[in-house]
Amino acid sequence: MRLELGKIFIKDMQFGNETKVENGVLYVNKEELLNEVGGDERVASIDFDIVRPGEEVRIIPVKDVIEPRVKVEGKGGIMPGFMSKVDIVGNGRTHVLKGAAVITTGKIVGFQEGIIDMCGEGAKYTPFSKTNNLVVICEPKEGINQHQHEEAIRTIGFKAAAYLGKAGKEIKPDEVKVFETLPLLQQAAQYPELPKVVYVYMLQSQGLLHDTYVYGVDAKKIIPTFLYPTEVFDGAIVSGNCVSACDKNPSYVHMNHPVIEELYERHGKDFNFLGCVITNENVYLADKERSSNWTAKLVEYLGADAVIISEEGFGNPDADLVMNCNKITDKGIKTVLITDEYAGQDGSSQSLADSTPKGDAVVTGGNANEVVVLPPMKKVIGHPEAANIIAGGHVGSLREDGSIEAEIQVITGATSEVGFNYLTARGF
């Protein structure tokens, strides 16, 4: 499968009389956008704001971040199962408004949404302090339950991103990148001298507002399966979960998956990248056993010499990560794990809820329990009092002066378990 990604670099975003891209500026017609995304009876109000890198603005609580994209050539459309039919995507040409993002906020859905600061200490931890952001502020009607609330906000965010993406359909991209994965036997034969690598892509799917969607299907209902990597860039996988902000994969991250992009970058040079095996994260032991058995079986069947395994979330999913590691290693296939840590505020606690001596090659996204003070901002979009509730905060996190003392767990993307973050390690 071959996909061209045409990147249109967005340097600024402004409201205007017409939604269009001109000279690197994305103009947004507010009234037209409202007509596009409105109409959900579960929502009391929808409003929009624009924030840019360096502005003294805080967005809290953040539900999802989505990148505007549009299908230009090839089958299907963006975010199949939601914004388009369920045709197989990942082929043809897709245009991307690079540097633009849609962020959804409003009254808190669960207790694990996050914070994005556009400047100051918090901006150092989140990649979304560097994007020009259309903030969609959705307030729910009284009486709807959390799952209805989550679905309404998720759908509105997807609609807003799809609407903005259309502005790039006829624009000549500033850069075009090509990604291609051949049918399996052809791909395996393409670089016979290089080790064959598969990416095991664990999806958060534990229910309780912990859901990820594959072609519109809740991932807790799937069994592990094979995916062309290019499908991911067209939004075949999107977020619907409210896990801790620091290691949640927003829809934007799925569409810009750094592990997949890096594997493509080194494909044909250091190894032969065969593709992705997607698997879910489960609550019950029998489901964990089933999914890890299937994952190991698929990886072996594909003839992989090595795999990279990433998880999303922490605690219970650590068991899925370890099961995948053990069963794949037992088949003689090398593994590298990507996770983050919850090692306590002093760093002395056990980092993961489960472990294995077979996990002898691990990349960490950082310790989510590190404490940070986020300075007050001139403008806050959303509900600042959520800082006292969201995971990583505590009663009193929001100070009288508007500053927030909390763990970096509250910051969207701070310890990304696929590496979509800014933390690095320093040796002593």
Image: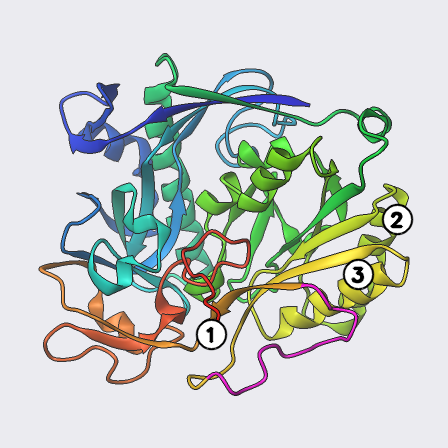
Q: Nearer the viewer, residue 9 or 29?
A: 9
Quick check: marks 3 and 1 in contact, CB under 8 Å? no
Mark 3 is surrounded, within 10 Å at the Cα level, by few (under 14), some (14 to 19) or many (20 or more) other residues, namely many
In the rendered image, which residue does mark 2 sit on?
300
Quadrant housing residue 59: bottom left
Does residue 343 appear to the left or right of 405 in the view shown? right
- For label 2, the SS is helix
Separation (CA) of disc 2 from disc 1: 40 Å
Mark 2 is surrounded, within 10 Å at the Cα level, by few (under 14), some (14 to 19) or many (20 or more) other residues, namely some
- For label 3, the SS is helix
Question: At label 3, which amino acid type do we have?
Answer: Ser
Q: Nearer the viewer, residue 91 or 359?
A: 359
- Residue 107: image x %, image y %? 28, 62
In the rendered image, which residue does mark 3 sit on?
292
Does residue 336 appear to the left or right of 365 in the view shown? right
Q: Nearer the viewer, residue 416 or 204?
A: 416
- Residue 349: image x %, image y %? 54, 87
Quadrant housing residue 361: bottom right
Q: Which of pointers 2 and 1 indicates the residue nearer the eye?
A: 1
At horizontal 14% and vertical 72% (from top left) the residue drawn is 402
Q: Which of pointers 3 and 1 indicates the residue nearer the eye?
A: 1
Q: Which residues are magenta?
A: 347-361
Separation (CA) of disc 3 from disc 1: 38 Å
In the rendered image, which residue does mark 1 sit on?
428
Q: Nearer the viewer, residue 421 or 106?
A: 421
